[in-house]
Amino acid sequence: MIEPSPSTGIPEPPFDAVVEAHGLTKIYRLYRSPWDRLFERLLRSPRHREQVAVRDVSFQVARGEGLGLVGQNGAGKSTLLKMLAGVLEPTSGSLRVAGTVSSILELGAGFHPEFTGRQNIRINAALLGLDAETVVQRTPAIESFCELDHYLDQPVKHYSTGMVMRLAFSIATQVDPEVLIVDEALSVGDGYFQKKCADRIYELLGQGTTLLFCSHAMYYVDAFCRQAIWLREGMVAAQGSAPQVIAEYERYLEHKGALTQAAPAKEGGARSGPARLVELRVGEGGARPLLRHGQPLRIEVAWECEDESLAFHVGVGVNRMDEVEVLTLSTRDLGLPALTGARRHQGVFEIPDLPLQKGEFVLYAFLLDERQLHVYDRRLLRPAFGIETGPYEFALLRVPYRWVPSVPEPSEHSGERQGSASPETARASLPE
C-alpha cells in the first residue's frame, strides 16, 4: 500500500522513473526570410541565427509524483513540455516517457473549430489511444465533468477560452492517463471549475498518475509537486524540492522588483465567485490602529458563499510594507476542521502577545478550500496597522528569551577556594 505524504496527503510513490530526460536541448533556426532558408539549402552556407529555447535539462519523475516548472514568460517551460508531450523533437539529448500521455498545452490545440464539442470529444479520445468502445464508455463522464450541457452540440469555434479549457481538461483527465502534462490550464476559467480541476489532479496523483505541471501560481506548484525546476532563459537556474525551488525563484523576483502573483490580491472589494471575502479588519474600529509590543492583535475575517455544503480554511499573512513576509496564520495549521454548513462565516485570529516592536504592516487574507489547494478569494488591507515605538528599537521582533551561563571548568587550584557560587540564569520577558 502506498502511504500518503504527511505534508500534502498525496501518496508517496516508490521511485520508478516514468519520465526521464537527459541533456534535453531545443534550438530553433531563425531566418530573415524564406529565401534565406532556400539559399542555405542550395549553397550550404549558414544564413540563419540560432535561438536556444531549452538547453541541457535533465530530470527523472517517478510514478505518482509531480514535477513543477516555474519561470518567467519565455523561459522555455512550454517548449520543454511540448518535447515531453511529443509535439516537438529535441535538437539534442534524450527523453523517455513510459505509459499513455495526456496533455493540455495551448488551449484549443487538437480541436477542430468546425466540429462540435461532442465530436471533438470522440476525436481527441481516439487520438489518446482509446478504442471506439472505450470512447463510448468514457464520453458520459467527460460530458458530465465539463458541464457544457447544450454547448456541446455547438461548434468549438464559438466557445470562450474558459469553455475550451473545460472541454480540454475534461478529455485529458477522464481518460485516466499515466502521464498528465498541464501547461497553465488552471489560469483560465472561473473559480468553481478551477477548484474542480485541482481536486481532479489531486485525485489522479493519488491513483499513481505522473504530473508535469507548469504554472505561475506557486501555491498549486507547491501543492501538486514534490520537485520543481526553475528555468531561466532556457537553462536550469534551480532544481530540487518544490518548496526550495519556489523560494529561490521568488527571491529572484523580489530582487528584480517584479514579484508577480498568479492572481494578485485586491485592495478592498472581493471578486465574484461561489465564495468571497467580505470583511478584513484589525481590532474594532475602521481606522488603522496603532499597537504596542505585547498587546493582543485581533484580525477579523468574514466571508459569504452560495452553497452551504462548501468547506473552507482561512489564511492570513502579515507583511511589512516593503512586502517582507513576517507572520502567517491559518485555520488548517491550527488543526481545525474545514468550516462549513452556513452561507456566512466569520471569525477572529488572535495573537495574545504581539512580538512586533516597530514598523507598518499590511494584511493578506486568503479564502481556501478544504485542502488549501484552491483559492476562492483573496483580500488586501493596506495599511493594516502600525507599531507605536518609544526609544529606537534595533529589531523587528522581540521574543521571550533567557541567558544560561555555562559552569566554568574547575582549575587545578580550585580546591583552595572556600565554597562556590552557582551561576544565575538571567531571563527576559519570561513568566516564572
Image (cartoon, rainbow, N blue to C red):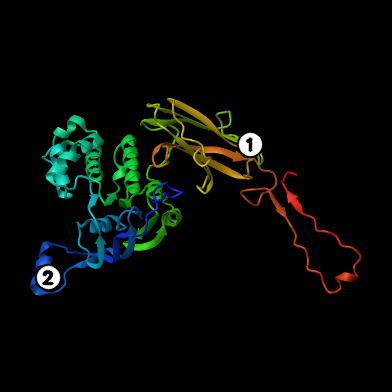
Q: Position of residue 244 (x, y in %)?
A: 45, 57
Residue at 16% of width from left, 70% of height from top? 47
> On screen, 8 above or below 46?
above
Q: Position of residue 252 (x, y in %)?
A: 43, 57
> On screen, 279 above or below 411?
above
* Mark 2, other Cα within 10 Å: few <14 / some 14–19 / many ≥20: some
Q: Position of residue 376 (x, y in %)?
A: 39, 36
Judge by depth and name the residue closer to the eye, 194 or 172: 172
Q: Residue furthest top?
A: 343
Residue 24 is left or right of residue 118, and the answer is right
Q: Quadrant of the C terminus?
A: top right
Residue 112 in view here: no
| Marks 2/1: CA–CA distance | 74 Å
Judge by depth and name the residue closer to the eye, 170 or 135: 135
Residue at 42% of width from left, 33% of height from top? 311
Judge by depth and name the residue closer to the eye, 265 or 210: 210
Judge by depth and name the residue closer to the eye, 351 or 288: 351
Residue 114 is left or right of residue 314, and the answer is left
Residue 267 is left or right of residue 215, and the answer is right
> On screen, 172 above or below 301?
below
Which residue position is annotated with label 2? 40
Query: Based on the displayed image, in which of its 4 quarters is residue 327 positioned?
Result: top right
Q: How many badges with numbers are in the image?
A: 2
Residue at 42% of width from left, 49% of height from top? 4
Amino acid type assigned to the residue bearing label 1 in the image: Pro
Q: Position of residue 185 (x, y in %)?
A: 28, 45
Please state which of the two labelled residues, at mark 2 or mark 1, is closer to the viewer. 1
Amino acid type assigned to the residue bearing label 2 in the image: Glu
Which residue position is annotated with label 1? 296
Label whose residue precedes the other's in the sequence (2 or 1): 2
Label 1 SS = loop
